[in-house]
Image: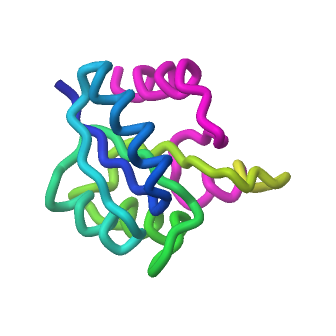
Amino acid sequence: MAKILLVEDNEMNRDMLSRRLLRKGFEVVIAEDGEAGVNMAGSESPDLILMDLSLPIIDGWEATRQIKANAETAQTPIIALTAHAMQGDEDKALEAGCDDYDTKPVNFKRLLEKIEKHLG
């Protein structure tokens, strides 16, 4: 069973996504801000990270840079999730180190395809 770290500050989004991922057979661990996400990327050793970009304490871009700069977590695939899909945001997320990008509201079928692609 693959472990997914969901880094999301919005309670409704956390609840909806984590329940749907659990039903698909994933183990889900949750961080509510970017700093906790960085810490849990190391302590939980997830197989994949879903990273909201608009986060308190450390935003998703900086959290991604820190995760990718750490040799222990650099290879963990990160899919950026954002509700504020502005032109250039996808490029900015990929430049920060995200391996993929998706928008909110989440199209779960499309997100699941991206998760499965990165998990191999």
Which quarter of the figure has residue 101? top right
Q: Is residue 64 magenta?
A: no
Point out the image quarter for the N terminus: top left
- Is 45 drawn above or below residue 115 in the view shown? below
The location of residue 36, given as percent across then percent down, is 30, 69
- Region rendered in magenta: 91-120
- State the predominant SS element of the stretch in magenta: helix
Q: Is residue 33 left or right of residue 46?
A: right
**x%, y% of residue 6?**
37, 48
Give the colour scheme shown.
rainbow
**Residue farthest to the front?**
12
Query: In screen coordinates, is 110 left or right of 70?
Result: right
Quarter residue 69 falls in: bottom left
Q: Looking at the picture, does residue 57 appear above or below residue 103?
A: below
**How many numbered dots are placed on residues in this image?**
0
Query: Residue 12, how many percent across, how many down?
Result: 48, 49
Looking at the image, the residue that sits furthest to the right is: 87
Q: Which residue is rendered at x = 35% and y = 74% of the image?
A: 35
- The residue closer to the viewer here, 96 or 26, is 26
**Does residue 99 show up magenta in the picture?**
yes
